[in-house]
Image (tube, helix red, strand yellow):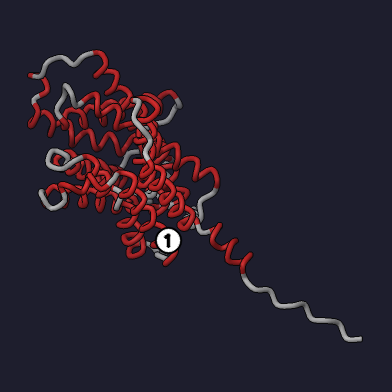
Amino acid sequence: MIPSPIQKTMSASDWALLIILSIVWGGSFLFIGVAVKELPPLTIVASRVCLGAATLYMVLRLMGLALPRGREVWTAFFGMGILNNVIPMVLIVWGQNHIASGLASILNATTPLFTVLVAHVLTKDERLTRQRLAGVLVGFLGVAVMIGAAAFQSWGMSIPAQMAVLAAALSYAFAGVFGRRFRAMGIPPLATAAGQVTASSAILLPLAMIVDRPWSLPTPSLHVAMALAGLALVSTAFAYILFFRLLARAGATNVGLVTLLIPVSAILFGVLLLGETLEARHMAGMALIAAGLVLIDGRLPSVLAHALRPRRPAPQGQG
């Protein structure tokens, strides 16, 4: 069975999935912020994907499903794991050791820009349009405004770290396009999520063992253990089920928009849970992001253009 073409315009349920995904991944900053106080980055990343993989495997078993077998399928799982987890996670972790997290967030928000370009070259049904490109650029400007000029103070001070985060964004873009193949292979989102995270665990766990030697670290406190659980259960297992479901329905360029919304979620979490202040630049940035998403969606501009188009006077009847 040949899958139907990717939707160019997302439905209301697709937008809902995108917003939920941004909230789930935006919340991961809270979990990571707690965990990094006691654990090194690679140990956090490896714990995240390993616990997430175990959770997804248990869900599969409870539903009476199994991970698909076959060399082709697992080659695809490892390819997706490398592009969507191993490369970007390692690069971002390394980059954030040298640049501010705000600047890293802005650089990571280039993901949808890279995605529309990669998808335009590598796919037939996700072609680049001027309106979509304009929407992505407006949304990216919104992220930069929302995070603020202070994030750019370290601009140029650590070029390799900035290039690392940009390379991570490019890797995410390729992952979005690469992940479309699971839909064509007939693998459901739950199994795709489990397979990808399992493959990522097989790579990241040995890496963490070699670099961090976690057995030599002090036992983490209860609140750190709970943060790791939240990171694995919510921001990995649940998030990737949403990610692959949305990817199968709406395509790589649409699912890549989540990186424009993640900073919004992270800032709102800070305001609601950490008592941080919502400033004017946050409101302005969110307004720009909303405008960018409206442009990308395409329906409202088309409706407005149709409404504002001059109408020809109706021909008068002959008497």
Rendered residue at 41%/43% (across/down): 283
Q: Position of residue 143 (x, y in %)?
A: 34, 48
Q: Position of residue 197 (x, y in %)?
A: 29, 35
Q: Is residue 235 left or right of residue 10?
A: left
Is 163 or 249 nearer to us in this picture? 163
Rendered residue at 8%/32% (across/down): 211
Rendered residue at 47%/48% (across/down): 249
Q: Is residue 315 left or right of residue 152?
A: right
Image quadrant where residue 207 sits? top left
Q: Amino acid at mark 1?
A: Arg
Q: Is residue 150 left or right of residue 68?
A: left
Looking at the figure, which quarter contains the C terminus? Answer: bottom right
Is 13 or 63 nearer to us in this picture? 13
Image quadrant where residue 151 sits? top left
Question: Considering the numbered disc 1 on the image, is that residue within a helix, a strand or a loop?
Answer: helix
Answer few, some or many: residues within 10 Å of disc 1's Cα (few below 14, many 20 plus, some between 14 and 19).
many
Find disc 1 in the rendering and name its residue.
132
Is 303 or 15 nearer to us in this picture? 303
| Image height of 23 relative to 317, above or below | above
Q: Position of residue 80 (x, y in %)?
A: 28, 45
Q: Position of residue 199 (x, y in %)?
A: 25, 37
Rendered residue at 86%/82% (across/down): 317
